[in-house]
Amino acid sequence: MESGSARPGISPFNFLESVMQSQTETTTANTDETVSPLETNFGNEQPVVTVPYSSLRPSALNARTKPLSNIPALAANIRAKGLLQNLVVHEMKGSRGKQRKYGVCAGQRREAALDLLHEQKHIAADYPVPVRIVSEGEALAISLIENSEREGLDPFDVLRAYRMLAEEGHSVDYIAALFSASPLTVKRRMKLANVSPRLLSLLREDAITLDQLAALALADDHETQEHIWFDANEWQRQPNYLRQAITRAEIDASRSRLVRFISLAAYEAAGGYVRRDLFSDDENAGYIADAELLQKLVAHKLDTTAAEVRAEGWAWTETRVERDFLELNRYGKLRPVQRPHTEDEQREMDALTAQQDELAEKIEALSEDDEDAYEEADRLNDEIERVNATIIALESRALVWDTQQMAQAGAFVIVGPQGELVIERGLVRRENSAALDAAGATVTGGPQAEAPDTLPAKAPNVKPVHSAKLCQRLTAHRTAAVHAELIAQPTVALAAVLHCLIPKALPEHYGRTSSCGYLAISGENNHDTLLSVADDLPASPAWNAVETQRARWIAELPAKRDDLLPWLLGQDPGTTLLDLLAFCTGTLLDGIAAEEKPHAINRLAGALNLDMTRYWTPTRTTYFDHVSKARIAEVLSAAVSPKAAADLDKMKKADAAAAAELRLAKTAWLPEVLTDLEVPATPSWSNRDDEDEDDSGDADTGDGTDDPPKGGDADAEPDAGNGTEQINDTSTDAEAAPAAGSPLKPWPFPTAESINSEQSGPLAA
């Protein structure tokens, strides 16, 4: 073959294959054997020259065929700093003449970035591009070598470079523009670069991962970072345990509804310290150290809002950090009066109703065979949701309260479950109900007496809202959702199992107790039972998550039972065994109920911050086909608007169910059985010998181990429903939140006690 050209009749790919084969095969040829021209001239590259941008063309000899990515970022970098690395090109056949054409065999991404800059008119056709010109025969081999032999920067070197740029005085925005990165990415890398040098040196040795460094970066001082890392066992070095070691006495702001209520900015403005987690994409990512300040800010915002509500004319207002439905049910509810719409309001209402009907007709007209129908349906549903919100706002403006009646009623100002402000107006106390009745006010849900009658009246036979079969169906979904959350939060599963086992193991300490109520410790698997009462469960996201884990463990566990214990003993207890425990615990959940009443599984639901809207939505199949038309209208009136409920009057039951599904699409409505978090009182029979001793024997010894009250529930958790002594299940003790920058105590591997205090606090809710 001639120098600089491929053999006749041999394709470039076959030619490359022969070259690579010649590099890998072991030969016994003499050292003075003639070497091919390609091998002798391969290192004699031509000097770098410049050619006009307009002369460049894509080359079929470029080894890279994968679609290109991140071209806009590269183009921005080239525009800011110029082309720092030359392209490698070869002269294309038949291009000799006025202007030669060059095929780009190495530097395809840079060529694409130049194309983008030219398209955006940032460079001209004669823009000088540095290139190295090689022969066509060498082009494919050089392209392969450049793309396969290039070694990226070591992560240590990347972080070191970022730190050096910052130490030279360059701003975050400058560095971000230099690397075409976001300012957040730059901040994250600089945060990693400021970790202890001892730990960074481990990164070069592959003895620590970037995820582990990111977790340790939560601590601001090097001493704490090194102490936590080097004092930990191998399995304690998982990123989640490292974060827990640093933030064990702090509140996770991304999960706290109280932080969402006041905002993290307000907490910081008040002087609160936030341990920022730059490596989380969650809103409000960070950890709050001052729980007492958080309480004060929440109380102040509630009190300020309560004063504004009382200024409306209400007789009284009260504040609560969480909604307690049992407490609210003790009050009557004053019904507002709906005034007639003004002419302008009526015209607006008619227009919105017509728009709503038009959108519904468009959805009905969509063809199921159309590939774009689902996308169009989502768009129309979003528009319907916007129109519904406007109608509700318009109707709410027409609801007014009678001034004289307001003087006999009050309101609760509450922090909602998602950190939103909730105001329950028109609440009627028992002592005010007679005066309101005399004034002709409409009061629903009569207020209950504070103390029961001596002889309680027999409860009237009231038909339940949900049938026993529907209750079982709904509570099966709740059980599956709790299982899915246990898989995601395995430490809560560990705490739940211990919560059930410890009173049985130590009856002399806790007294003879009944079961915890939400786990079948006997080992009864709930899989078939759940499916038998809820045939729609396989479509649930929770069930899919559980079944994915089931398939995982079937694949990972040994086939023979005799091999199971040795396999378990060889696994990492902090990851594999904890995850497996969480899955197995979920299979023992006993949460199906045939009636609406407090259930023990609500302890776990509270501990997991369970949001059922993630796992269940109201549809014909899941709900509306199983309730009466009157119930459908009641739900629609409460969740959408009274007018939406009135529209169902002339519909048949099936049509009403379909309309309700459409109107409640993308809403967060849930039936009461899925929102009630009340926990039943569990009977306890104590066998202690000192029950009948003098009361002085029950005095507080100051060791924090008070005996349970007589006749009370020794196994039940304390009720945090109405008080404000705890915020978001966080103790207000001063020692619970160390000052920022204070040295941490020795490694706090999660124990039953620490998990109980950090994860199981909501079990009491």
Image (tube, rainbow, N blue to C red):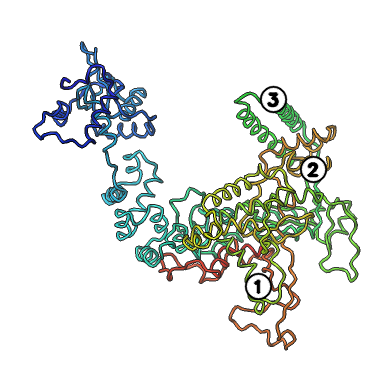
| Tags 3 and 2 touching, CB below 8 Å | no
Dot 1, crowdedness within 10 Å: few (<14), some or many (≥20)? many
Residue type at numbered disc 2: His
Q: Which residue appears at 41% of the width and 46% of the height? A: 184
Q: In this view, does 757 lie to the left or right of 59?
A: right
- Quadrant of the frame with the N terminus: top left
Q: In this view, does 273 lie to the left or right of 680?
A: left
Q: Report which quarter residue 695 is drawn in.
A: bottom right
Where's residue 592, x and y in %?
73, 55
Secondary structure under tag 2 reads helix
Give whichever of 675, 535 is nearer the camera: 535
Q: Mark 2 points at which residue?
A: 626
Q: In the displayed structure, would residue 615 be above or below residue 745? A: above
Q: Which residue appears at 69% of the width and 27% of the height? A: 363
The mark lying in front, picked from 3 and 2, is 2
Lower position in the chain sequence, tag 3 or tag 2: 3
Total of numbered circles in the picture?
3
Q: Name the residue under label 3.
A: 362
Q: Report which quarter residue 691 is drawn in.
A: bottom right
For the residues marked 2 and 1, what is the alpha-carbon distance in whole angstroms?
A: 40 Å
Q: Residue 503 carries which label?
A: 1
For the residues marked 3 and 1, what is the alpha-carbon distance in whole angstroms?
A: 60 Å
Q: Which residue lies furthest to the top in this view?
A: 97
Where's residue 568, x and y in %?
51, 61
Dot 3, crowdedness within 10 Å: few (<14), some or many (≥20)? few
Lower position in the chain sequence, tag 3 or tag 1: 3
Give whichever of 513, 57 is nearer the camera: 513
For the residues marked 3 and 2, what is the alpha-carbon distance in whole angstroms?
A: 27 Å
Q: In the displayed structure, would residue 513 be above or below residue 349? A: below
The mark lying in front, picked from 2 and 1, is 1
Residue type at numbered disc 3: Lys
